[in-house]
Image (cartoon, rainbow, N blue to C red):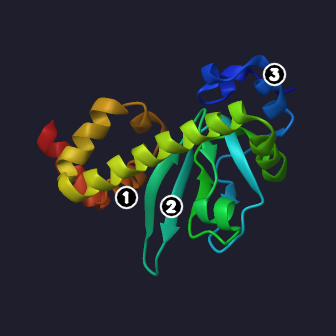
Amino acid sequence: MISFHRTDLPLEEELSDVSVALIEQTLTPIVLPKGYRLLEDKEGIKHAYLIKKGIVRIFITTEDKEMTFEFAREKDILSTSLGYFYQAPSYERFELLEDAILYQIDLVAMKQLFYESIEICNWARQFTELNAIKTQKQLIDMLVLTPEDRYLQLMKYDKTLFQRVPLKQIASYIGISPISLSRIRARIK
């Protein structure tokens, strides 16, 4: 039996017990195996997901390669902007890199809570703002930092990622080939 705890939520300290209980009513626990694809490109999103345990790779595919642009993990909420805001098919894919415990979020019920509770609406806004800042920083880093600097930054601020994610996907995340990542790692050692 999977039990929900308020600490499963991001920014849970911003929520009263009443709001946590209301949010919990929109959640359905699910267990999925490593390798499972939660979302394929060109699919419309029907649910969002809160990660209780596990890590998810978010990536796009071009004709010749996959490009990873995010890793979501515990306390992250998986959704697509196009799907959530515009009910349009996504361009990204979600793949589980570990066996995972997720809470499937009923988006219709959650959106209703936004209308009914200013506290829950503000909580969601804060979470969205933090994600926007994180995305902007990632974009700026891709534009101004060298691949080696991006790697070093990842090593400094997110060491556990290297224990949970294959190096070829980390290479993709920092925008280089696995061979280039091997060269960087050899230079640094």
Callout in the foreground (2, 1): 2
- What residue is drawn where x is 71% and y is 50%? 48
Mark 3, residue position = 18
Q: Residue at the spot x=27%, y=56% of the render?
A: 142
32 sits left or right of 1 in the view: left
Q: Which mark is residue 59?
A: 2
Q: CA distance from mark 3 to mark 2?
A: 36 Å
Residue type, numbered disc 2: Phe
Name the amino acid type tagged 3: Val
Q: Residues within 10 Å of mark 2 (few under 14, many from 20)?
A: many
Is any part of residue 64 visible from this angle? yes
Q: Is residue 8 above or below residue 126?
A: above
The correct choice, above or below, for 29 with respect to 137 in the image is above
Q: Secondary structure at mark 3?
A: helix
Residues at discs 2 and 1 in contact (Cβ within 8 Å): yes
Q: Amino acid at mark 1?
A: Ser
